[in-house]
Amino acid sequence: MNLAGTLATPTPTPATAPRHEMPLNPFSSYFLRSSSLRRSLLASLRKVSPAAVSPMASASTVAAAENGAAKPAEKQPPPVQVAKRLEKFKTTIFTQMSMLAIKHGAINLGQGFPNFDGPEFVKEAAIQAINAGKNQYARGYGVPELNSAIAERFLKDSGLQVDPEKEVTVTSGCTEAIAATILGLINPGDEVILFAPFYDSYEATLSMAGANVKAITLRPPDFSVPFEELKAAVSKNTRAIMINTPHNPTGKMFTREELEFIAALCKENDVLLFSDEVYDKLVFEADHISMASIPGMYERTVTLNSLGKTFSLTGWKIGWAIAPPHLTWGVRQAHSFLTFATCTPMQAAAAAALRAPDSYYEELRRDYGAKKALLVNGLKDAGFIVYPSSGTYFVMVDHTPFGFDNDIEFCEYLIREVGVVAIPPSVFYLNPEDGKKLVRFTFCKDDDTLIAAVERMKTKLRKK
Amino acid sequence: MEAKLSEASRRVTPSPIQELSKLSQRVGAINLAEGFPDFPAPAHLKAAAAAAIAADHNQYRHVQGICDILAETMRRDHGLDVDPLTDFAICCGQSEAFSAAIFAIIDQGDEVLIFDPAFETYQTCIELARGVPVYVPLDPPSWTLNEDKFLKSFTNRTKAVVLNSPHNPTGKVFGKEELLIIAQACKKMDCFVITDEVYEYITYDENKHISLASLPGMQDRTIITSSLSKTYSVTGWRIGWACAPANIASAIRNIHVKLTDSAPAPFQEAALVALTSTPDFYSSLKKDYTVRRDYILQTLTDFGLRISFKPQGSIFVFAEISRSWQLSDMDFVTNLITSAGVAAVPGRGFFHTGTDDPSYHHRYVRFAFCKSDDTLKAAAQRMQKLAGSEAWMRPDVLTRPHH
């Protein structure tokens, strides 16, 4: 019995969604009623905020909400002693929104991955690698060919020459590079500074490492770094600062001035810098600058990146960390006990991808630039206050013209009444209040999808 | 800047085994050290993976079908009733599944019992989560579970037991009675078991793999981990899973999402094909590995090593250096690499109880036999040649041990 054919699409796709619409969520068979979704989302928010209720109660509330829908008659198992660190771990906002999206047949501009596929030459390279037998364990820190390709690309992009053997570590996606960096280099009690809003794995992983997290909020309209606030926050107690440039969810790109200011603080206080640069090829209005290339910073910087966003192959899980040898060692230690090695045939294909000619990157920028224009103009026409985004494939907008109190309520309304999914970004802040007026849209979708979504918003959104 | 390394990563040091690995590469030794096949992955699986890539299954994804099939298989083979919707986490290999499971249940100071000798990775995962590994020695020569030592290892901080069966490095398959002892103790002390069942389909003779979770009272407290790697000879694909009661599985999934987000999508698709292989596939797997096992046992016996315990499962044999040879495992392996060009793994890296216990920790060598016929034959020839030469056994010819 070969199930591969019947199971090619893991979940049913609603008839109204575009052909390329892919079900996004892991647990598509969960159909939560929206009120229980709201309860679990708000419970999540409470856990994220400093004034959290008892962590264990919150954790079991979320678990019960998730499981209750599937097995209503099941007797409750005895309270299980999961680790305290799980306070910070909850079903992600992406999953919750996606579940609601499928239920309502909404167009998904929430979760940040393309509904179009990667380039043929990269896929071909992977198929060739599989057929050529590259299916066994790769060297833990990366297939030599890929480490070299990463180093070559980094040299072109940043001007920095790094040793592929000693300074490049391949991981299962940038998510793992982040986890390995944090677990390998952060001690319990270390102070780490983040910029809010932040990608949700940063805070959760820092919590796993037992770090004390401080967040500096980036605010609209330009989400610029508040220099005085940052300076006041950094001290000799600070172990690391994490930046994400180009920045998810705002689309901001850290300017040279901002990077130099942060660099000065790092050098003065002997602070490490973790820089997540996965969107470095999706830049529109400015040049991407790697923190590692700022004078004096390479020795204290870990640069994180991946294949997925640049080559529309987010499911391949090929990422990497570039750092000087003394920092790489810590990253590799953690990595070898998190996943041991990274998918072998995809590494071979990634090496081919990274050797793509400049024309590939130019075309990528052009295509995404056009999509961005499509979405941004549509959002403006629909009545949102749109903040300029110079990088990534995200746009942040203000939804308050439509009269909702917070982002979650707005996003639920958007799914149910308008048929479009966006992400409520309040979960990306330490203080959710900071994000409640904002919404994140993505434009990494084919043009038809974007056009259809914009149409729905223009016709159905009502200003208050 | 080295002061910036975390305490956890600093405790981990490069092992003598890594040095031997470099030596082995330098001389181009035949690799009977590492547990991955040098024969091709099954053609129909490679085709399935290639098809998945071509069909655009390349974005973040969770393939629910994997859980459905696994649940059905577990019901059929082990009588386990698991819910495919809630009880699974699909991870980047069993490595990540184990890691996520540890992070899900281990708090600072929690103790985790591990049977010794043991695969090296468990300890460091536990320490990364700030847990405390506690080793329970299995008794040579047959690596039997010593009930007394086992029960005495529990304290009020014991949170979990790790059970790897079939076992790396010894090839032991824990029997029903031993599993009952483990089950009873875990129920009494109310702790978890995390199983590593990656060799579940590779058992020999009458030995059957029994899933601990299938014993009465155990499903509620057992986290099963396994993967495609060894069964389907695709160690480089990184598709594994954890199966546990719903609320534990949920915790593991949440951690997994923060560690890697998802397992490689096209290989999840190919997993659907792998996991629905015909019964012929599994019986051939067993048959082929039995032939390889018997072949290498003959090779090693002819060479003069003692097979004090015949592997009941897994792809490893833990051979004993005869007492008449005044030779440590490191010396033996070093010499075998340099004089015969065959690499194996010194057993000392798998033992953790007590330091430098001379009685047996330095007397074992692990050989992997998940290798093609040509490889095994070539290794046998090289070893025969060396065994025939006088030079092999003389202490003054030995290279200095690498530390």
Image (tube, coloured by chain):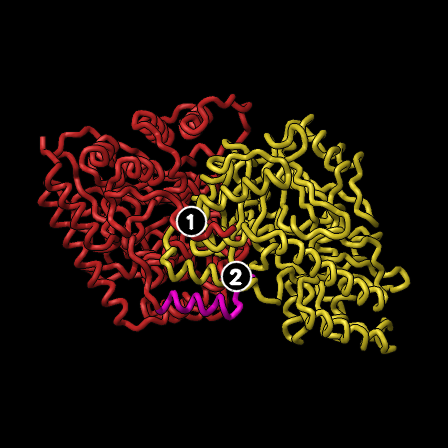
Q: Residue B227, how many percent across, how many down?
A: 57, 50
Badge 1 element: loop
Which residue is drawn at the image coordinates 66% and 71% (left, top)? B23
**In this orientation, which residue lies closer to the viewer: A267 or B283?**
B283
In the figure, the shade used to draw chain B is yellow
Instruction: Say if B268 sits above or below B400 in the image.
Output: above
Q: Please identify the quarter of the rendering in which residue A48 is found.
A: top left
A126 drawn magenta: yes
**Is residue A408 at least partly visible in the picture?**
yes
Mark closer to the observer (2, 1): 1
Report if residue A50 is visible in the image: no
User: Which colour is chain A painted?
Assistant: red
Residue A314 inside the magenta-drawn segment = no
Question: Residue B300 vs residue A423: left or right?
Answer: right
Residue range in magenta is A121-140
State the image quarter where residue A198 is shown: top left
